Amino acid sequence: MRLQRFSKAVSVAVVAALALGACGGGSESPDSAATNTSITANGTEPQNPLLPANTNEVGGGRIMDLLFEGLLSYDADGKTVNEIAESIETTDSQNYTITLKDGKTFTNGEPVTASSFVDAWNFGAAAKNAQLNSYFFESIKGYDEVSAEGATVDTMSGLKVVDDKTFTVELNQPESDWPLRLGYTAFYPLPSEAFEDPAAFGENPVGNGPYMLAGDDAWQHEVQIELVANPDYTGTRVPQNDGVTFKFYSSYDAAYADLQADNLDVLDQMPAAAQKTFKSDLGEGRYSEKPTAQNQTITIPGYLDEFSGEAGALRRQAISMAINRQEIADVIFTGSRQPAADFTAPVIEGFDTDLAGSEVLEYNPERAKELWDEAEAISPWPEGKAFTIGYNADGDHKEWVDAVCNALKNNLGVDAQGKAYSTFKELRSDATAKTLSGAIRTGWQADYPSLYNFLGPLYATGAGSNDGDYSSQAFDDLLAQALAAPTAEEGAVIFNQAQEVLLEDLPVVPLWYQVAQTGWSNNVTDVETGWNGVPVYYNIARK
C-alpha cells in the first residue's frame, strides 16, 4: 500500500483451490473501569481524507488498518488470518465465492454485508471517484469499463451479491496471488453513509475495526489523531489497550526526545542522529531491530526531458552506479540497511539476488562517469540546472540525501542538491499531481506479502503509486503472465523477469532494504514489529 511511507519471514502458499478456514473470534475489551491504558505512537498527517481506496501512504494507512477490518488480516509474520471472511473458495483461481461471518457490524450499528464490500470496491474502482488505489481492482472483470475516462458505468460486472453473507468475484484471468491482497486497505468495506458524502466521511470515518475515532474532534490536523478501542469488536486483533493516539511530529529527532522522556510510547524509526546511541540510550528491552518488507528508492520522473530517451537512460545508470550504498549504510545507518539488489525486499518469498542487469546497482564510479559523459555527448545537461532530490523534512532523510548528492557531485561532476519539503503530505501531493521538477526520495512498505505488491502498484502503466509515470509494455506483459501463473512459485520466476526490465529502464534507483528499528517507553510492554515494519499497536499494553 504504501508509499513511505517510509513505505518476516513470510511463507504464504496460494493454491488453486483456496478455502480459508475461519479463525478464532475476539475476547472482551480491556477493563475500562481502571486507569486509562491508552498509548501514544508517532505518525504523520494523512495525505487525504480517510477513505480505503484513497489511502496509499503510511500516515493514513496505519490509522485505516486500526479503524477498519477486511476479509483478511495479516499477522506479525505476514500470514493471512480470516477476519470478516468465513471462507474464500475457488476451483480455478479466477472465480471466487466469498462467504462472510455472522454478527459483524460497523461502529454505527450497521451490519457488514456482502453489499458493504461490493459497493466499496465499485466506488474505489470508478473513474468518477478518482481514488488513488483504484488500480487494485483492475483484476476484476469490468474494471476497464468503470475506470475509463468519462465512463458512465460505475459497477464492475465481475462483482455479484448473492445474499447478505455471500458475494462472488470473477477476475479477468486466473491470478496466483489475488487472495493475498484482500487484507489490504483498498479492499475494506464501507457503511452506506460513506457514499452520501465521501469527503465528509473521510474526515470522520466510521469503520468496523478494533478501534474507532475518539469523537468528532479526534483528528486534529497536523497535530494528532486519537483512537479508542471499539467495544463491539469481535475479530482476532483484540486491543490490549484502551486506545492509540498518533502524534504527528515535524521530525524524528523530536519524537525520539519524547520517547526518551517517556512522553511517547512507541517510535517506529530511530533518527539518524541516534543511530550510534539509541541502544545505550534506551537500554536492553526497550528496542528491537527486524528486517521487514520495506525499501528505499529515488524516483526520477520519466516526464523530465533530461531523463528521457537514450541520454536519460544513460544518466539513470550513471546516477545508480555513482552511489556507494554500502558506505552510506555503514556510516549513516550503522549497518542497519542492506544495499539493494532488486526492487522488492529479501523477506518476501521469491526474492532473488541473481537478476540479469543487477550490476547497475553496484558502486562503480569510473563506469558511472563514462555513462554520464556519453549522455552529455548526446544531449548536454541544461546549463545552470541542479539535479535535485526531494525529501520530506519530517522523515529524517536529510543526512543520507546529502550523502547521495555529494557522491553525484564528486563522481559525475553534476550540481546535485537536496530539496526539502516540510511534510510528507506536501511531498506526496507533488508526486501524485505529477508536478515534480526533479527526483524525489521514495520508499515502499508492503501492503501484502507478495513480489507483485512491490512491482504492480509502483511501475505498471497508470498505477496509482507510479510517481515517475513509467510505462513499459514489456514490463506490463510480464506482470500479467506472472499473475496468471498456476502457482505462486512459478509466478515469482516471471515477476523476477519483469524486474530485469526495470533494471534496464531504472524508473527508480533502488538504494537499500529497511530494518525496522522500534523503540518504546518505560510505560509499555509487548511491543512487536510486524512483517511490514509497522508496530502491532493492538497488542501493546501499559504497565
Image: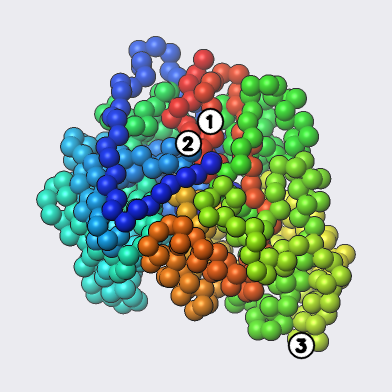
* Callout 3 amino acid: Ile
Question: Taking the image as drawn, is residue 138 in sight?
Answer: yes
Closer-to-camera residue (112/15): 15
Q: Earlier in the sequence, mark 2 or mark 1?
A: 2
Whether residue 47 sits left or right of residue 486 in the image: it is right
* Residue 541 against residue 148 in the figure, above or below: above
Q: Residue furthest left?
A: 163
Give the Cα distance between marks 2 and 3. Answer: 51 Å
Secondary structure at numbered mark 2: loop
Quarter of the view holding residue 315: bottom right
Q: Mark 2 near mark 1, Cβ–Cβ under 8 Å? A: yes
Q: Which residue is mark 1?
A: 528
Q: Nearer the viewer, residue 491 or 370?
A: 491
Q: Nearer the viewer, residue 260 or 355?
A: 355
Q: Which mark is residue 195?
A: none
Label 2: which residue?
Answer: 76
Question: Which numbered disc flags the more N-terminal residue, 3 or 1?
Answer: 3
The image's mark for residue 378 is: 3
Q: Label 2 vs label 1: CA separation?
A: 8 Å
